[in-house]
Image (cartoon, rainbow, N blue to C red):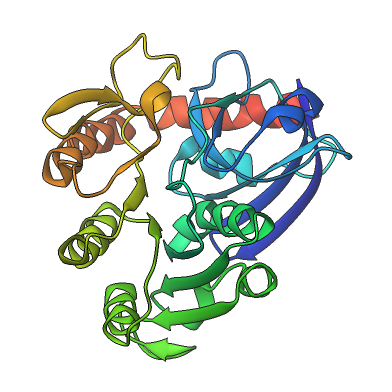
Amino acid sequence: MARIVRKQALNPSVTLLEVEAPLIAKKAQAGQFIILRLDEQGERIPLTIADFDRERGTVTIIFQAVGLTTRLLAGLEAGSVIADFVGPLGRPTELPQGARRVCIVGGGVGCAIAYPQAKCCKGQGMTVDVIAGFRSRDIVILEEEFRAVSDHLYVMTDDGSWGERGLVTEKLQSLIAAGIRYDAVVAIGPIPMMKFVSRTTEPYGIPTLVSLNPIMIDGTGMCGGCRVTVGGEMKFACVDGPDFDGHLVDFDELMNRNALYRDREAREVERHPCRMEQMARRLAEFQG
């Protein structure tokens, strides 16, 4: 069991939890993730490690409340416990040898995953540019944290309500066109965003890593649910990734697979509202 030591609402739908997990904190590296389960009958969900503190023995996760489990997780308070909290899983991010200047591109809640990448690169003495994109000002997260670990921070909003108006790909294209030479680009966010960041960098031959989020269950490569096609070969995001060469990923297949159960999930919610209520009550009892 893992105890929550700190909770912070980053915006109305995104929550930060700092969790007591000393063994994970001891080994965690940027790019890796954990799998948690709220109670014995709960589902297993993967969440990327947003930060870790080896001295305090804590791991930070940041997530958006979009499904039942994440909504219930967001309802927990400091002092509550999570039944299962397993990790670190996946392979740490590996940038090209000798990389000196990198650009970290985050989109929406994907910025929570981009933050440890920027922090790690800065800690290794690299020049770090960060492009963080959001729909509007009210959902901007981690701005000050990014500012502390980057040499240049560019906040982009779709509506221009904060930072600069435009897409992250437009900003990246303008920086490259201005003559900045990046040794690597790391893109983390919605699949379409990662796809078009990769298309932006490909003509320039800039190595580009993307962190993929396919359907994942066990995190050990046994279930095969997180398979993705990279360079024409089947890979498993949980053990071969989650980072992959963005120029080789079949993004269209990934989008189709991620949407595979969307209609079924909607039908199940309509058919079994009582089951969801029971799970919510069970978690409330678990907290008590």
* Residue under the image location 22 percent in, 60 percent down: 205
Relative to 99, residue 147 above or below: below
Location of residue 125 with respect to 270 vertically, above or below = below
Whether residue 107 appears in this view of the structure is no
In the image, residue 288 sits, relative to residue 84, either above or below, namely below
Q: Residue at x 49, y 52 (%)?
A: 98
Q: How far from the left and from the top, in percent, is residue 228? A: 23, 30
Locate residue 115: give its quadrant: bottom right
Q: Is residue 76 above or below residue 190?
A: above
186 and 108: which is toward the camera: 186
Q: Which residue is more in the foreground, 167 or 4? A: 167
Query: In the rendered view, does 168 fall on the left or right side of 33?
Result: left
Total number of numbered labels?
0
Q: Estimate the x, y position of residue 133 in percent, counting from the top left.
A: 41, 72
Residue 38: give x, y in percent of width and height. 62, 26
In the rendered image, the residue lying farthest to the front is 98
The residue positioned 41% from the left and 21% from the top of the image is: 239
| Residue 66 in sight | yes
Depth order, front residue of 204/194: 204
In depth, the one of 17 and 235 nearer the eye is 235
Q: Is residue 251 left or right of residue 223?
A: left
Residue with the most extreme top position: 222
* Side (left or right) of 44 relative to 146: left
Task: Choose top left, top right, bottom left or bottom right for residue 18.
Answer: top right
Quarter holding the N terminus? top right
Tell me the residue at 55%/79% (across/down): 152
